[in-house]
Image (cartoon, coloured by chain):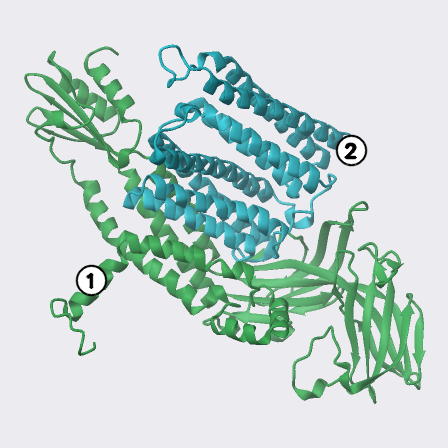
Chain colours: A cyan, B green
Amino acid sequence: MSRNWAYLSNYLIYSSMAVYTLSFFAHAIETAWAVRVPTEDSNQNLDYKRTEKVARIATAMMILGFLLLVAGVIARGVSAGRVPWGNMYEFSITGAMAFSGAYLAALRKYDLRWLGLIVSIAVLLTLGTAVAVLYRPSAPLVPALKSTWLVIHVSAAIVSGGVFLLANAIAAAYLYLDAMESRGERTAWAKRLPSLEDLDQLSYRLVAFVFPLWTFAVIAGAIWAESAWGRYWGWDPKETWAFITWVAYAAYLHARVTIGWRGRKAAWLCLFAGSTFLFNYVYVNIWGTGKHTYSGL
Amino acid sequence: MSQEITIPELGSVGLLRYSWRQLTSMRTALILLLMLGIAAIPGSIVPQRTQNPMKVSEYFKNSPDLSKWMDRFSLFDVYGSPWFSAIYILLFISLIGCVLPRTIEHFHAARALPPATPKNLDRMEHHSSWSPQGNELEIARAWFKAKRFRVLEKDGSISAEKGYMRETGNLFFHLALIFILLGISFSSLFGMRGEAILNVGERFVNTPTSYDSLQFGKLFNQSNLSDFTITVDKFVAKYNIDTNAPEDYTLNVSFAKGDLTKTEKRVIKVNSPLAFGNTNIYLQANGYSPVVTVRDSKGNVAMQGPVPFLPQDANLRSIGAIKVPDADPQIGFVGSFVPTYARSEGNGAISVFPEALDPRLLLSAWIGDLGLDTGVPQSVYRIDTSKMKQVGLKSLKPGETFTYPQGSITFEGYQQWVNLQIVNDPGKNFALLGGIVAILGLLASLFTRRRRIWIRVGKSVEVAGLAKNAAPGLEIEMAQFVAMLKGEK
C-alpha cells in the first residue's frame, strides 16, 4: 500500500518535471519572440500582444506543474505515513514547491512573468538533483523527528526559504539591470522588466513579509530542540547558520529602514543574506556535522 | 590619556559622551550586527569543545602547532570566547542605548496629540482640494473616529495620526531580545546539566557522584540538586527492517521524588522528556552492555556484571574495555560487541543490524599494569596497553567461555544501557516569553503603517496625507477618504 503511494509520488514528480519543462520552453519562446517583434512606428518599443498567448500558456503550465508537485509531495507523505520532510530528497521537492508557490503567489499581485524563466529553471534543477542524486526510498522517521514540531518548524523554514530565494532572484535581477543601465540603455528584451525602483521595493517587501516567519521558524526549532536534545540552543552548525541568516536579514532590514540603504548596496546585502540560507541548506545538510543530519545521504 | 595627543575641546566627559553616541548610533549597531554574524561562522567549521570534544582532541593530535595557536584565539570555544562575547555585549549595550531613549520618547509621543495641521497643505503629498459643501469636517471627524485615528482639531482643520503600534512593536521586539539574553544568562548562572549512563535495571540517585559528567552554573547551589531517584525498568528500541534506521525508543522508568514513598511509573521518549519543575530528564543515547564474569585461575569470581560499550556505527557495532584492576596481575580486555554478527572481508566482524539477533563479543585479553593509579584520567572504553602483554584473542557467543593461562572470562549475555541527560534550566521560560514577544512585536512593527492625514475646511476643502517610512497603501486610503467626503460612498 505505502509502496504504491511512493510510486505514485515518483510518477507525479516526474510528470511535474515534464510540465515545468514545457513551462520553461514557453517562457523561453515568450522572451525570444518579444524581442523579435518590434512595432511598426518604432523598433525600440516591443509588442507583447503577440506573445501574450504564449506567456499565458507558460504561466498555466507553471500552475499545472506546481499542482502536480503538490500532489507528489502529498503522496510522498502518505506513503510514509507522516509529513514528507524526513530527508534531503523530501526537503528538496518541498523546497522547489515552496519556491514556485512563492512565485505564483507573488504573481497574483505583481507582474513577475519576466522571472518565470528563471523560476522554471531553478525548479527543474532542484527537482532534477533531488531525483537523480538525493532520492531515498520512502521510510518512517527516526525517533528524534517524531514530533509535531517537525510540521511547524520545517514548514515555516521551507516557506521562508522559498520567499528568501525569490527575493534573492529579484535582487540579482536588480543588480544585473543596474549594471546594464549604467553601461547605457537596457537591451530590448530587458525593457519589459520593471523599473529598478520597483525591483528594489519588491525584494524588500518579500523579505519584510517573511522575516517574522523565519524568526518563528528559528524559535520553533529552539523549542523543539529543547524537548528533543535537552537544550534550546547549542550552536549546532545548522543552528549557527540559521542564526547567521537571521542576523544578515536583520541587518538588511535595519539598513533599509533606519539608515536608508537602497538599490545596489541593499541588493548586495540581500544576496549575501540569501546565500547564507542556501549555504545552510546545501553545505550543512550534506557535509556538515552536528545534530541536524537528516539528509539521509 | 597620552601627553602628545590632546583633545582639548572634548575632555574626558566629552570623550565618554562621544564614544557613547558612536556606540549607540545605528551605523555602529549595524556593523556590530554584521560582525556577530561573521564571528559565528568559524564555530560552525572548526570543531567546538562544547559539542564535540573528541574531534577537538583529534585536531590537537593531527596538527598540534596550529591547534595551539587556534586555541589561543579561542577557536575551539568560539561562542564563549572573549571576542565573540565582546561583540554581542557591545551590540546589546548599543541596543539598550538606542532603545531606552526611544521608549521614553515614544511613551511621551503616544500620549501626545498629533502636531497641528501644516499651513500649506498643497505642498504635502496626496493633496487635493475642492469647494466645500459644509459638512466635511463632521464626516471627517466620524471617519477618523471609526478608524481610530488620533486627532487634533483646531481652527477648522483636523490633523489625524495612526500607526503608533509600529514603534510600540519595534520597541517590544528589541526589549524582548534583551529579555532572551537575560534568560540565557540566568540559565547559565543558575542551571545545571549532567549525564549518566545506566544499565537496564539500575537505579540512579540524584547526587553529584551519580553522574558521569556534570556541569553547574557559576551560582548554582549544590544543595539545590533536586531529590529524586529513577530506576530503569525497561528499554525497547525498534528498528526498520529495510533501512536499519531506528523507529522508536521507549524507556520505562520508576520515578520517585523527595521522600521516595511514592514511586510513579513513567515513560521517557526522545521527544518527550520526564519533566518536573525546571528539571527535565532526557533519553539521549543507548547501547549495549555485554554481561561478563571474569574468574581467576582458581575459579574465584574477580568481576561480574554488565559493562557499557560505546556504539561506533548505525548498526551498533560497539567498542569497550573490561578492566579488572583487583586481579593480580591486573587484567584487561579490549572488546568489540556486535549485536548481529557477520564477517566482512577486510573489516573482520561487523554488525548488520542494530538489534541483538546474533550477538558476539570479540575480546583480546591483556595482562600487566592497567595504568589506573597514575592519576591520569582514562577513558572507560579504552585500555592503555603500553605496559601490558596480550595473552589471547577470542570471539564468544552468549554462554561461551574463553580460558587463558591466568583465568577465564564468560560472556553471559547482554544488557542495554541508556544515557540520561538531566537538565535544570531555570531561565528557559524567560527566553521563551522573550521569543514570543519578539515575534509579536516584529509583526506589529512590520505590518503597521504609520501615517498622518490632514483636512482643512475654509474657502475650499483641502486634504493631504503623509506616510512614514514610505509605507505603501496611503493612496488607497486617501482615495476612500476623499470619496467619503464628497459623498460618493
- Label 2 resides on the chain identified as A
Left or right of residue B229: residue B301 = right
Image location of residue A49, percent across then percent down: 45, 12
Q: Depth check: give the residue in front, A70 or B323.
A: A70
> Which quadrant of the structure image shows residue B232?
bottom right
The location of residue B477, given as percent across then percent down, is: 27, 23
Of residues B406 and B47, the one nearer the viewer is: B47
Indicate whether A48 appears above or below B418: above
Residue pointed to by mark 2:
A3
Can you tell which of label 2 and label 1 is closer to the viewer? 1
The N terminus of chain A lies in which quarter of the figure?
top right
Q: Amino acid at mark 2?
A: Arg
The residue tagged 1 is B18
The spot of residue B16 in percent (x, y) is 21, 66
| Residue B165 visible to the viewer | yes
- Marks 2 and 1, Cα distance to the nearest angstrom? 69 Å
Q: Position of residue B41 (x, y in %)?
A: 49, 58
Question: Around disc 1, counting alpha carbons within 10 Å, would you say few (fewer than 14), some (14 to 19), or many (20 or more)?
Answer: few
Instruction: Look at label 1 and name its amino acid.
Output: Tyr
